[in-house]
Amino acid sequence: MVDEDRRTQAAVVFDALGLAYEQAFADSVPHRASLRWLVERLAPGSRVLDVGSGTGRPTARTLTEAGHRVLGIDVSPVMVDLAVRQVPGAEFRLADIRDTPLPEDSFDAACAYFSLMQMSRAEQAAVVAKLARAVRPGGFVVLATVPLDLEDTEGVFMGQPVRITSFTAEAFTELASGAGLTVLAEEQTVFTPRGPEAGPEPQLFLHCVREAG
């Protein structure tokens, strides 16, 4: 069973942030570059899963405008409502990826941009493996995280109390490889969100393909 306290915490945090989250991160050049990487490799009309879809921008909107079929999943009712209104061309569901059934080989690509960090390490590993199985062989998985060695650590994110779990860049890359993904490109950068309470944060983007067989 999914940890209900973790689910509730994530929903409360992002319900409170709403559009402020989008405004803080909308200008992320690395995020948009990652989306271009994915769009350039997808066949027309690809089916893409967006885990932690937030307000729908920029991820779902970019993919939808490129002609792809997007399913976004998020635990925050506020975020799902915003996404439905902002990106009407995509489908959004209020759900937790940890207990959402995903048929194998059902997507051409899946992405999870900074949406795993309020899960335990075991849960993050299970979700990455689940995404790897959900994309067809030769399909793509894009993952982004803040590469720090943290486990159930108290912190503050955009004024909201959070508990964060993450991996070092090396450990997160090993996690992806262990899930049956081949890392084609890796980008480490530092991004400073907009806002008076925001500080610079390291970011890691992994662009992967599901191995055949």
Image (tube, rainbow, N blue to C red):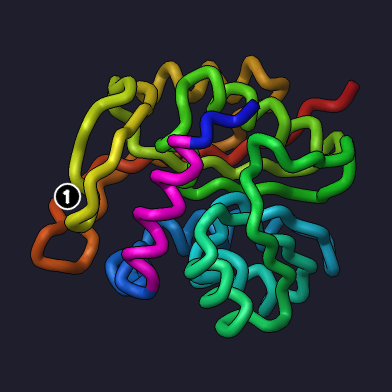
Task: Locate residue 145 relative to residue 108 in the image: left or right.
Answer: left
Q: Residue at x 39, y 44 (%)?
A: 9
Q: Nearer the viewer, residue 130 or 80?
A: 80
Other-residue count near label 1 (Cα within 10 Å), few / some / many at <14 / 14–19 / ≥20: few
Task: Locate residue 38 relative to residue 47 in the image: left or right.
Answer: left
Q: Is residue 142 above or below residue 128?
A: below
Q: Secondary structure at mark 1?
A: loop
Q: Nearer the viewer, residue 208 or 23?
A: 23
- Give the prevailing secondary structure in the magenta stretch: helix
Q: Nearer the viewer, residue 100 or 26?
A: 100
Q: Position of residue 173 (x, y in %)?
A: 50, 23
Q: Which residue is mark 1?
A: 200
Task: Locate residue 7 relative to residue 137 in the image: left or right.
Answer: left
Which quadrant of the structure image shows residue 171?
top left
Magenta segment boundaries in residue numbering: 5-18
Task: Locate residue 133 relative to residue 177 in the image: left or right.
Answer: right
Q: Is residue 172 magenta?
A: no
Q: Residue at x 29, y 27 (%)?
A: 148
Q: Residue at x 61, y 68 (%)?
A: 60
Q: Amino acid at mark 1?
A: Pro
User: Quarter holding the C terminus?
Assistant: top right
Q: Is residue 96 above or below residue 147?
A: below
Residue lying furthest left = 196
